[in-house]
Image (spheres, helix red, strand yellow):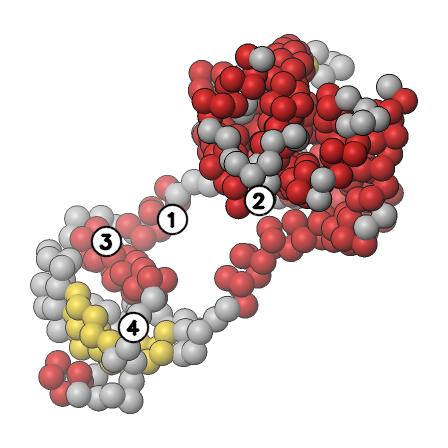
């Protein structure tokens, strides 16, 4: 164990003292927030130039109904279609047929350059609204417009969990589905990236040391299995350190910084919801925002979430890192490893795609078994945890995962102890199987 500790310390210090680790640890949370916010910001600020459309309305219904926007200006004209199309100073021509109400296909757009999907949807939706209003007016119902306004309803659905109760014995209000979706996605993607990034790090480290013949010297002092476990645990400690730092930052921001930034009345509402004294219906805050603030300021839930993240990160990393190390020991260069690591990469990719299916139904048979089978369980289970699944499923998944780690480490060790001494020839899968049987 002393020899393994020395190897762990060496692997840990080499990576943690690296500037890249420090920068990544600090910037990764910021980068993830930016990546989530950028699409919305782009859609908000990326407004195009104003485009003018000449409108030839033979139906006579659109003049007072088509509304200009920041990007689209409607100009009605008496020109013929051929004359209007000859005008290259405008963006295009919109022709509305005389019988548009009965034949909605009588709407044609002629542009002098390529149009966008959003612009075409805007035009179509405005024309559809005019057609629908005109068809309704044919029923000759008095105050029809007011009746339609009165009929419209905005349903705010609040979900409760029968299997979870508050201190008063009432059903506990469930976390917003939007917040749950985002948490599941973040956790699933995070673990997916860690498995690929740090697993590849172990493989590349083994390949580098093997090609430089450093391993030939090291195995004179330590056994191949000690070397394998020391390297894997050393890199695993780096990943755990990074997540632990993020946990402290997130919990600190949620418990200390966020309440100071939010107005007092909002924080009072959040605290009332957390204590079960108020529901999202009673609050004057958007339900998704209230649920997000409630979760972000609940230190207990955040700590438990990071505990699960660390447990599945460690188990998933040990499971896959042993295989990556075995591949690294069997080849002399990164290029030679591409074929051998394909069987390892496929389950990781499959786990990512299965985690997407979790968002449709976190309790489906596919989601359940995807979170139990060790090849996919680290990513899929982390995507399911925010949906408040039964605790026994989480611990059962962890038990299966860590039991599988023992078997995988044993098999990887058999390959590793032979592979580190093999040079000049990339082994086939048949030869790897022979190494395992020796």
Which is in the foreground here, disc 2 or disc 4?
2
On the image, which quarter does residue 103 sit in? bottom left
In this rendering, the label closer to the viewer, 1 or 3: 3
Query: For mark 3, what is the residue?
Result: 132
**Badges 2 and 4: C-beta atoms under 8 Å apart?**
no
Crowd band around label 3 with a 10 angstrom C-alpha radius: few (<14), some (14–19), many (20+): few
Q: Which of marks 4 and 1 is in front?
A: 4
| Tag 1 near tag 2, CB within 8 Å | no
| Label 2 or label 4, whichever comes before in sequence order | 4
Q: What element carries label 3?
A: helix
Which numbered tag is attached to residue 293?
none
Q: Is residue 3 left or right of residue 330?
A: right
| Residue at (25, 88) in percent of width and height | 88
Q: Which of marks 1 and 2 is nearer the N terminus?
A: 1
Q: Which residue is tagged 2?
A: 334
Q: Mark 4 points at which residue?
A: 114
| Residue 384 in picture, x, y percent from top left | 57, 25
Is residue 303 visible to the viewer in this orientation of the structure?
Answer: no
Determine whether, in the image, residue 259 is placed left or right of residue 201. Answer: right
Instruction: Give me the C-alpha separation between circle 2 and circle 4.
Output: 45 Å
Secondary structure of residue under mark 4:
loop
- Residue 247 image point, x, y percent: 79, 37
Instruction: Point out the frontmost of discs 3 and 2.
Output: 2
> SS for tag 2?
helix
Residue 228 x, y percent position in the rendering: 72, 26
- Say what secondary structure mark 1 lies in: helix
Q: Name the residue under label 1.
A: 149
- The residue drawn where x is 74% and y is 33% is 216
Residue contact between numbered discs 3 and 2, judged by CB atoms under 8 Å: no
In three-dimensional space, the C-alpha distance between marks 3 and 4, rounded to whole angstroms, equals 29 Å
Q: Earlier in the sequence, mark 3 or mark 4?
A: 4
Q: Residue at x 22, y 88 (%)?
A: 87
């Amino acid at each position: 164990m002393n020899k393994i500790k020395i190897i762990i310390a060496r692997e840990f210090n080499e990576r943690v003292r690296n500037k890249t680790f420090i920068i990544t640890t600090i910037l990764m949370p910021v980068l993830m927030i930016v990546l989530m916010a950028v699409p919305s910001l782009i859609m908000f600020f990326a407004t195009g130039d104003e485009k003018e459309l000449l409108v030839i309305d033979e139906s006579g219904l659109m003049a007072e109904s088509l509304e200009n926007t920041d990007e689209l200006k409607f100009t009605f004209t008496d020109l013929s279609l051929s004359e209007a199309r000859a005008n290259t100073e405008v963006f295009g021509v919109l022709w509305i047929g005389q019988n548009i109400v009965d034949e909605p296909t009588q709407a044609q757009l002629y542009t002098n350059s390529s149009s966008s999907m959003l612009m075409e949807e805007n035009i179509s939706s405005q024309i559809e609204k005019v057609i629908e209003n005109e068809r309704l007016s044919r029923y000759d119902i008095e105050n029809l417009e007011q009746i339609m306004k009165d009929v419209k309803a905005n349903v705010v659905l609040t979900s409760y969990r029968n299997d979870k109760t508050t201190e008063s014995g009432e059903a506990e209000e469930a976390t917003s589905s939007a917040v749950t979706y985002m948490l599941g996605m973040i956790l699933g993607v995070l673990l997916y990236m860690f498995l690929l990034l740090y697993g590849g790090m172990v493989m590349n480290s083994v390949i580098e040391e093997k090609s430089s013949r450093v391993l030939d010297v090291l195995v004179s002092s330590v056994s191949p299995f000690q070397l394998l476990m020391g390297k894997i645990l050393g890199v695993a400690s780096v990943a755990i350190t990074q997540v632990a730092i993020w946990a402290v930052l997130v919990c600190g921001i949620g418990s200390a910084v966020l309440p100071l930034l939010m107005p007092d009345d909002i924080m009072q509402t959040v605290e009332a919801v957390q204590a079960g004294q108020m529901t999202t219906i009673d609050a004057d805050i958007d339900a998704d925002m209230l649920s997000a603030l409630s979760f972000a300021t609940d230190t207990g839930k955040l700590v438990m979430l990071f505990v699960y993240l660390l447990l599945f990160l460690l188990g998933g990393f040990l499971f896959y890192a042993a295989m990556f190390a075995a591949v690294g020991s069997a080849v002399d260069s990164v290029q030679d490893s591409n074929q051998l690591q394909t069987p390892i990469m496929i389950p990781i990719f499959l786990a990512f795609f299965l985690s997407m299916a979790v968002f449709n139904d976190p309790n489906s048979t596919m989601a359940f078994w995807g979170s139990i089978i060790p090849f996919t369980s680290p990513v899929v289970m982390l995507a399911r945890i925010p949906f408040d699944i039964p605790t026994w499923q989480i611990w059962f998944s962890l038990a299966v995962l860590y039991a599988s780690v023992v078997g995988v480490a044993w098999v990887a060790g058999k390959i590793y102890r032979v592979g580190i001494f093999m040079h000049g020839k990339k082994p086939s899968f048949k030869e790897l199987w022979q190494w395992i049987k020796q």
